[in-house]
Image (spheres, rainbow, N blue to C red):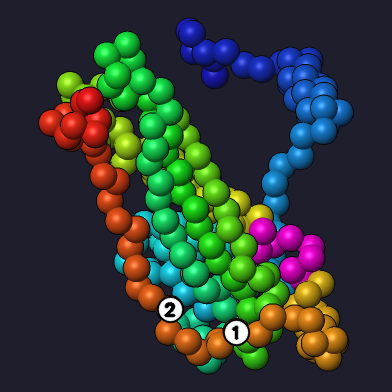
Amino acid sequence: MYFAGQHTQSPRQSWLLRGACLALFMLISACGFTLRGVTPLPFETLYVGIADNTQFGADVRRALRAASPDTKLVASPKDAQAILQEVSNTRALREVSLNAQGRVEEYELGINYTFRLIDAKGRALIPDTTLSIYREMPYDDQIVQAKQGQIETLYIAMQRDLVSRLLRRMTAPEVRKAFENREQRAEDGETPLYDPTAPQPRRTPTPWQTPSTTDPAYTR
């Protein structure tokens, strides 16, 4: 039964739509674009030595589960084939430019995150590695409270970028190769050794210290 206002799709229209979708897919493929799939980790169990009560720790675990669903995140390093250890997580805030009155009008925010990935015997799969991220932010000392919120928002975005970079590093082909050849690498005596059972500090990065408008160091 046909009702007023109802439209039916003819076979010709259907084929045209399919053809357009196929052409679009071929064009995207020709441009070198590929959909990112799951890149599994080479080990079955992993201990994440990052505080799970922080947004960063939660984001790292979520990304690992999505990238390697067959890898189980365990609660103790003694139960893990690989251990992700956090070495340091620091923030930086420095002046970039001043206005005509000598007041800061732009800051650079930075995160320096150092980590290592080891196997159950403490052999380094990824030796101490530092990931650094920097972003610039305009600043107005007349609206300090608003800028504090902007700093935190920018920090969250930087942190997400950090999670992506950490994940790419852990799922790199050389990590799989290092894990598969860990026994042979240990015999060479060139692989750094760490304590896999060492308690990881439950640290939270210190808050950004937003400059005070009454501080002579900034108001000049």
Q: Residue at x 43, y 78 (%)?
A: 200
Left or right of residue 89: residue 131: right
Q: How far apart are the alpha carbons under marks 2 and 1?
A: 12 Å
Q: Residue at x 53, y 62 (%)?
A: 114
In the figure, 204 relative to 76: above or below?
above
Instruction: List x then y, in percent, for residue 209.
Output: 26, 44
Q: Say which residue label 1 marks.
A: 194
Q: Which residues are magenta?
A: 169-176
The secondary element bearing badge 1 is classed as loop
Ranked by sequence position, the earlier of labels 2 and 1 is 1
Left or right of residue 193: residue 199: left
Residue farthest toward the left in the current orientation of the protein: 214
Can I make out residue 145 in this image? no
In the figure, 206 relative to 68: above or below?
above
Residue 13 sits inside the magenta stretch: no
Q: Amino acid at mark 1?
A: Tyr
Q: Say which residue label 2 marks.
A: 200
- Give neighbour class at mark 1: few <14, some 14-19, many 20+ (Cα, 10 Å): some
Instruction: List x then y, in percent, for residue 105.
Output: 33, 21
